[in-house]
Amino acid sequence: MHFRIPIVLAFFVALAAAGCAAPFSVHQLAPREAQLALTGNVLTTGELSDFTKIVLRKHDLLSSFEHDPDTALATLRTATIANPRAEDELFALAELSYLHAENTATLHSQQAHYLAAALYGYALLFPGPDIEPLESIDPRARIAADIYNRALAEAFETKNRADVELAAGIYPLPFGQIEVAFDATSLDFGVGRFTDFMR
């Protein structure tokens, strides 16, 4: 009988300690796993970077992008237009547009989203005379440049999906259209000319 009080007391102490436990845990990653987790993006893993996920959470669009990406992109674009120095949002728009293009079935819609991704990437890298560009050591600068290059190649791929065919013209965007100028003489190199671009 005299053992019952310590057992009951021990039970309540254990219960109280469990209630004070943190709602999260920490586990160690191997260096390569940690590097991939920190640098992963839509081009390297097929998933959004942490930079973009933070922006989606900030604007309460994480769930919206999963269920209605067009509306989420339009909402984020409106917020970005209201703040010309929104480099976080521009980066997110570039990555989100690229991912949406990858997940879009029709080639016409794919091209529009790839072009949008390229435009957002370019706007982030070259923001204009009154806005400071990203620091060269900012990892988003390298990712944005890669998204820009890949998105352009995807936007102008041929129907066989093996080559890239650059052409001037008016092309649709998810939010309007863009006129693309292309000077074929820019492909001249010495006495030859660059041809057959591969993506």
Image (spheres, rainbow, N blue to C red):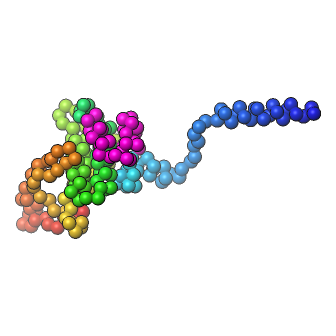
Q: Nearer the viewer, residue 12 or 44?
A: 12
Residue at left offset 48%, top offset 49%: 34
Residue 191 location (% of width, % of height): 6, 66
Q: Nearer the viewer, residue 55 or 148?
A: 55
Q: State which quadrant residue 159 falls in.
A: bottom left
Residue 44 location (% of width, % of height): 37, 55
Compared to 16, does 188 lie above or below? below
Whether residue 178 is visible: yes
Does residue 60 appear left or right of residue 74 in this picture? right
Q: Nearer the viewer, residue 115 or 43?
A: 115
Residue at left offset 44%, top offset 52%: 36
Quarter holding the C terminus is bottom left
Whether residue 154 is visible: no
Quarter holding the N terminus is top right
Does residue 35 appear left or right of residue 169 in this picture? right
For the record, the magenta segment spans: 50-79
Q: State which quadrant residue 21 falls in.
A: top right
Compared to 123, does 188 lie above or below? below
Residue 125 location (% of width, % of height): 24, 42
Residue 17 location (% of width, % of height): 70, 33
Examine the structure image and report whether residue 66 is included in the region drawn in magenta: yes
Residue at left offset 40%, top offset 43%: 63
Find the residue positioned furthest to the right. 1
